[in-house]
Image (spheres, grey):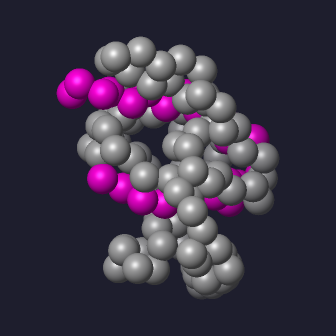
């Protein structure tokens, strides 16, 4: 597993993400992925596929989780303004990445890159 490769945003991208969260303020919480693939007593496995410019539902990470990133070049995490957290952008290494992340985040995932972003997200219900 590797650490995310966070990058500094240029002013245009920062402005774009700030506008996104203003426009989506007040949205209801949805799923952490675009499709639930499997759920049992121990895990929930989600698929997320985002085309360039596409965003996920606003979602909350109730469990520790593992991201298995298959493809993409850049993805942003955009927390609601009410969290007091700033948006962030990560560059996806060629060949993907696997990252373990603690529970607690609330955000939209936004594909700010030029490639399709694809991941499998595994929520660890008993971590």
Q: Is residue 37 above or below residue 17?
A: above
The percent coordinates of residue 7 (x first, y second) are 47, 62
**Residue 55 is one of the magenta-drawn residues:** no
Q: Position of residue 115 (x, y in %)?
A: 76, 44
Picture quadrant of residue 85: bottom left
Q: Residue at x 49, y 31 (%)?
A: 121
Q: Nearer the viewer, residue 121 or 69?
A: 121
Determine the image quadrant of residue 54: bottom right
> Residue at 38% across / 21% down in the picture?
43
- The answer to which of 105 and 26 lies nearer the viewer is 26
Whether 78 is drawn above or below 72: the answer is: below
Which image quarter is the C terminus in? top left
Residue in the image at 36% along x and 56% along y: 105
Q: Is residue 114 left or right of residue 77?
A: right
Relative vertical location of residue 29 with respect to residue 16 in this rendering, above or below: above
Left or right of 81 in this view: 94: right
- Horizontally, residue 60 falls left or right of residue 35, namely left
Count of picture labels: 0
Foreground pick, 85 / 113: 85
Magenta residues span: 104-127
Is residue 109 at all visible to an observer of this figure? no
Q: Position of residue 35 (x, y in %)?
A: 65, 32
Tell me: residue 81, above or below residue 55: below
Residue 123: say if magenta. yes
Q: Position of residue 123 (x, y in %)?
A: 39, 30
Residue 126 appears in the picture as rendered: yes
On-image quarter of the N terminus: top left
């Amino acid at each position: 597993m590797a650490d995310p490769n966070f990058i500094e945003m240029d002013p245009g991208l920062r402005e774009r993400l700030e506008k996104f969260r203003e426009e989506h303020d007040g949205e209801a919480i949805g799923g952490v992925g675009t499709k639930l693939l499997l759920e049992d007593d121990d895990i929930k496995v989600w698929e997320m596929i985002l085309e360039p410019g596409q965003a996920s539902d606003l979602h909350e990470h109730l469990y520790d989780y593992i991201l298995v990133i298959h493809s993409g070049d850049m993805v942003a995490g955009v927390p609601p303004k009410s969290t007091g957290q700033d948006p962030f952008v990560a560059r996806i290494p060629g060949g993907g990445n696997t990252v373990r992340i603690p529970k607690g985040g609330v955000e939209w995932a936004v594909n700010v890159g030029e490639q399709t972003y694809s991941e499998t997200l595994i929520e660890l219900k008993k971590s």
